[in-house]
Amino acid sequence: MTLIAPSLLAADYLKLGEEIKRMESAGVDYLHIDVMDGHFVPNLTFGIDMVAQIAKSTTVPLDVHLMLAEPERYIEAFANAGAAIISVHIEACTHIHATLKAIKKTGAKAGVVLNPGTPAEALNAVLSEADLILQMTVNPGFGGQSFIPETLENIEKLATWRTENNYNYLIEVDGGINQETAELAKKAGTDVLVAGSYLFHSPNLEIAITDMRR
Ligand code: DX5
Ligand code: ZN
């Protein structure tokens, strides 16, 4: 089963409500929301109130990707805002094990994110704690970048370790996902495809989503 999570980063912000309804009607599994602080990544995007308003406007679960330094400071706020999944970067967390526990304590699912340059082995000690592992397939900060094929190796490892040890995490990819790269990611073991530009700029959303699921 392939799950689809459109990234609102690529939406038309002046029509955000309509954009969300459009994705909801197309039957997406999550709405992916990229929160950036201008510090961990060189860009600024959405905050807590934005997530809270989006949560009130839709029944689609929110997949909140925190690209923040010290993300542990904001976990409770995003959980209260209505995030179903909260993902933090391993590169931004001094105490990743404690941070994943803190996310789960709020009732949200706990995700951990790997930048393209971070080896999958960095997660060895938290694989049993994670509900989701998000492999960045571009450097985080901007939409519309090209997929980095070397990141597939991490996905293959995460999929193998999951089978060998009966771990429960979902594997998600984010960045440069389109019809071709979705296929590569799927073959490597991905469950959840995040796509921004490809879905929001698609001339036929329903077909794009059906093709991606396939
Ligand atoms: C990048 C974000 C992505 C971004 C992907 O830092 O994490 O979610 O929206 O955009 P596309 O699909 O256009 O590469
Ligand atoms: Zn993202």
Image: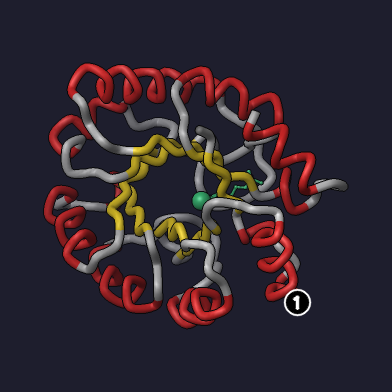
Q: Residue drawn 51% across and 59% down?
A: 34
Queried on whether the Cβ of the residue with tag 1 lies below 8 angstroms from ligand 1, the answer reads no
Query: Which color scheme did the rendering employ for the protein?
Result: secondary structure
Quarter holding residue 106? bottom left
Residue 146 in the image: state x and y as whole percent: 65, 33
Residue 21 in the image: state x and y as whole percent: 69, 68
Q: Is residue 158 above or below residue 111?
A: above
Decide if residue 60 is on the left or right side of residue 200. left
Residue 210 in the image: state x and y as whole percent: 71, 37
* Residue placed most toward the observer, 151 or 132: 132
Q: Secondary structure at mark 1?
A: helix
Q: Is residue 136 above or below residue 22?
A: above
Q: Residue drawn 58% across and 78% down?
A: 57
Q: Residue drawn 74% across and 53% down?
A: 200
Q: Is residue 189 above or below residue 2?
A: above
* Residue placed most toward the observer, 45 or 124: 124
Residue 202 in the image: state x and y as whole percent: 81, 46
Q: Is residue 107 above or below residue 164?
A: below
Quarter holding residue 108? bottom left
Q: Which residue is mark 1?
A: 14
Decide if residue 182 is on the left or right side of residue 205. left
* Residue placed most toward the observer, 144 or 184: 184
Q: Residue drawn 69% across and 24% down?
A: 180
Please name the amino acid that badge 1 sits on: Leu
- Dot 1: within a 10 Å radius of its alpha carbon, few (fewer than 14), some, or many (20 or more) residues? few
Q: Residue furthest right?
A: 203
* Residue placed most toward the observer, 181 or 91: 181
Query: What is the total number of numbered labels drawn onto the structure image?
Result: 1
Quadrant where the C terminus sits is top right
